[in-house]
């Protein structure tokens, strides 16, 4: 059974660090929903037996609850055990949350990023800390009992004390899942340009690693399982949909810019809004070679706490184990140590063929 991802590219305001495919042309939303419904109908044979659904963006919560319902009804949710929707705290109202829950959403991913107003303003978020906290509480009151939040660290000017407060604030909200990302300076983004111009100074690598280590330690103390590099969950609340990306199981992508992966074929819709709305967008695809599949298995598997079977790794891992960067589990899997997580990309590159 496959997972389904639906891309909603609309944002009321573009964040200064983001390079995802998105648009602020909100007047295109209704037409976009119609295009999504058309694609679902055209690919109906691919979206049967769907087990997980994820509405991501962009900002899915820019859509009316009625349109969320239409999309889910078109897909069919009878066999879906997890239906996630990303939500901006600035869009949260009790009425809206109740409506999307009634439409079928049973898991929320709330893009908070920080509980510090100065940092939220720095990175261009349109909500404040009070709205973030209130959004979680309203979601809980609306009946959501599977809530994830996003937090970011290594932001310019961010201190360790601020980061610790963010983590404690998250824990006080009694949520089930936390995704935490170190800031990436993507080429062409406003934040990257400000750093390049000397207006802002990036946090150094040692401080970023210290923030990450504290995060891992504190969430472990609080009972969270660190099941993927950037993801932590109360046992039983690991993201089922996102786990498909990491373990190589099939998923179907609907919407402009959305990717699909079935067998050894990866396909995608171009990130061209106007072409998608006109029905002229062409899907592209690539056939993965055995080497491609192996390299992806290494790249994705080592990001998880399950790791990769040692017998499946074609290069010698002994040096990395002796250096304390990797370790072997009792069941013969190779996983990254805490020290190894700091340079995981380099380790992965070394083990690829």
Image (cartoon, rainbow, N blue to C red):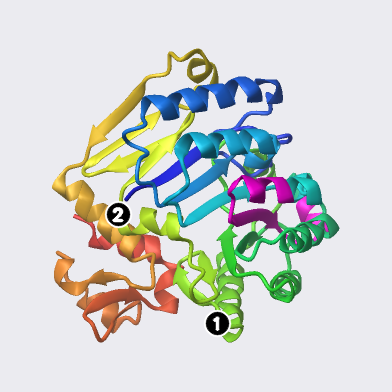
Residue placed most toward the observer, 160 or 177: 177
Residue situated furthest front in the rendering: 78
Q: Label 2, secondary structure: give it.
A: loop
Give the residue at x 70% y 70%. 170
The x, y position of residue 33, in whole percent, is: 58, 26
Left or right, 246 with respect to 85, comes to: left
Provide the secondary structure element on which disc 1 rests.
helix
In the rendered image, residue 306, in percent from the top left (x then y), is placed at 33, 72
Q: Residue placed at 57% from the left, 40% from the top?
A: 57
| Residue drawn at the location 28% of the way across and 53% of the way down | 296
**Which residue occupies the foreground of this view, 255 or 83?**
83
Q: Which residue is mark 1?
A: 220
Q: Position of residue 254 (x, y in %)?
A: 45, 34
Task: Report crowding for label 2: few under 14, some 14 to 19, many 20 or more residues within 10 A (C-alpha).
Answer: some
Is residue 127 visible in the rendered image? The answer is: no
Sequence-earlier tag: 2 or 1: 1
Give the number of the disc on residue 248: 2
Q: Is residue 239 visible?
A: yes
Quarter of the image where one finds residue 68: top right
Q: Position of residue 349 (x, y in %)?
A: 30, 58
Magenta segment: does it hold 99? yes
Magenta-highlighted residues: 98-121
280 magenta-colored: no
């Amino acid at each position: 059974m496959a997972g389904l991802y639906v891309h909603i590219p609309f944002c009321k305001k573009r964040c200064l660090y983001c390079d995802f495919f998105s648009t602020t042309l909100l007047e295109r939303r209704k037409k976009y929903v119609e295009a999504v419904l058309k694609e679902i109908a055209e690919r109906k044979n691919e979206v049967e037996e769907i087990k997980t659904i994820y509405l991501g963006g962009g900002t899915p919560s820019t859509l009316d609850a009625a349109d969320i319902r239409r999309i889910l009804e078109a897909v069919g949710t009878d066999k879906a055990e997890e239906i996630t929707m990303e939500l901006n705290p600035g869009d949260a109202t009790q009425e809206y949350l109740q409506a999307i829950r009634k439409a079928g959403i049973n898991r929320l991913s709330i893009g908070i990023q920080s509980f510090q107003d100065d940092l939220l303003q720095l990175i261009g978020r349109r909500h404040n800390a009070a709205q973030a906290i209130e959004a979680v509480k309203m979601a809980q009151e609306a009946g959501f009992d599977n809530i994830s939040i996003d937090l970011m660290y290594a932001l310019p000017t961010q201190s360790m004390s601020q980061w610790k407060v963010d983590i404690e604030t998250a824990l006080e909200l009694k949520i089930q899942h936390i995704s935490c990302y170190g800031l990436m300076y993507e080429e062409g983004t406003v934040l990257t340009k400000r750093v390049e111009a000397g207006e802002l100074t990036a946090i150094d690598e040692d401080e970023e690693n210290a923030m990450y280590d504290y995060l891992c330690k504190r969430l472990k103390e609080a009972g969270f399982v660190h099941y993927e590099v950037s993801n932590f969950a109360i046992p039983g609340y690991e993201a089922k949909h996102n786990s498909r990306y990491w373990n190589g199981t099939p998923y179907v992508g609907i919407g402009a810019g959305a990717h699909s992966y079935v067998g050894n074929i990866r396909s995608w819709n171009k990130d061209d809004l106007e072409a998608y709305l006109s029905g002229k967008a062409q899907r592209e695809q690539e056939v993965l070679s055995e080497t491609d599949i192996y390299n992806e298995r290494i790249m994705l598997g080592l990001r998880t706490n399950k790791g990769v079977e040692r017998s499946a790794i074609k290069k010698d891992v002994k040096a990395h184990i002796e250096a304390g960067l990797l370790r072997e589990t009792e069941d013969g899997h190779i996983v990254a140590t805490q020290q190894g997580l700091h340079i995981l990309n380099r380790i992965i590159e070394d083990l690829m063929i």
